[in-house]
Amino acid sequence: MNLDELGLKGGLVVSCQALEHEPLHSSLIMGRMAIAAKEGGAIGIRANTAADVKEIKQQVDLPVIGIVKRNYGTNPVFITPTIQEVHELAEVHAEIVAVDATLRARPDGKTLDEFVQEIRAQYPELLLMGDISTKEEAINAERLGFDLISSTLFGYTEETAGRKLYDNQFEALKEMISSVQTPVVAEGNIMTPEMAATCLEMGVYCVVVGGAITRPQQITERFVSEIAKLRASSPHVK
């Protein structure tokens, strides 16, 4: 399928994910979350694991960006790190498969170049998204022919640790957009509708939002944190 046929351009993709240690961890719940996202106007879903992708596709007719988060020992690459995870996502017909496209060593010893060649050889029609963290990685992902490039890993690699995508008015995202012709997706710590709109105004292909919509424990923590700050600073709040 052609990328533009999916209808993602200019819209909101909602990331419906819950890891094993989180209270909403369940393919059933993620399927219901996807329904809620669609009812709210989402034009796509990002999901983790083949089981969740399969359930979500049974519940909504939106395109799905599939990933499999899997740890291999202490290797830092965990977003669809090997061809095994690609097999799992292709089997459940994820429209797009996102993989770690940083320059870090992969758990199976393959370079990113070798990994992309392996995927293209076995799944030539599969749309690929490269999750990156820097402008240099975006340029490399474009060289390798990724269909989409996403800022997902900005702030989560050794080189970018502790930084947020919205720092300095989205300076890093602007650099990524200006460095490549490949469509760039904004993802990572986009916490408000205003932030999402800003990213679209900057020229991203679409915006992916997860925790600000689908992780109630994180949303609750932000409210509690602000209340705690108020209590600490104001004698009138008990």
Image (cartoon, rainbow, N blue to C red):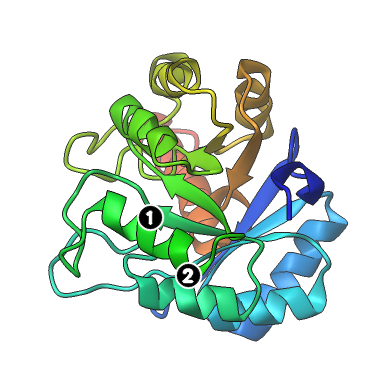
Within the image, what quadrant is residue 141 found in?
top left
Horizontally, residue 201 falls left or right of residue 230, namely right
Q: Earlier in the sequence, mark 2 or mark 1?
A: 1
Q: Residue at x 67, y 84 (%)?
A: 28
Residue 42 visible to an observer of this rendering: no
Choose between 207 and 103: the one closer to the eye: 103
Residue type at mark 2 is: Gln
**Residue 80 in the image: x percent, y percent?**
39, 65
Dividing the image into 4 quarters, which one contains the N terminus?
bottom right
Corner quadrant of residue 51 = bottom right
Q: Nearer the viewer, residue 171 or 137?
A: 137
Residue 201 falls in image quadrant: top right
> Which residue is situated farthest in the front direction here?
121
Any part of residue 48 in sight: yes
Q: Residue 138 got which mark?
A: none
Q: Does residue 3 lie above or below 74 as drawn?
A: above
Q: Residue at x 80, y 68 (%)?
A: 35
Q: Given the image, on which type of amino acid does mark 1 rest?
A: Val
- The residue mark sitting in front, 2 or 1, is 2
Q: Residues within 10 Å of mark 1 (few under 14, many from 20)?
A: many
Identify the mark at residue 116; answer none if there is no mark: 1
Looking at the picture, does residue 231 appear above or below residue 121? above
Tell me residue 223's x, y (percent): 53, 47
The residue beneath circle 2 is: 122
Please indicate whether residue 205 sits to the left or right of residue 60 in the image: left
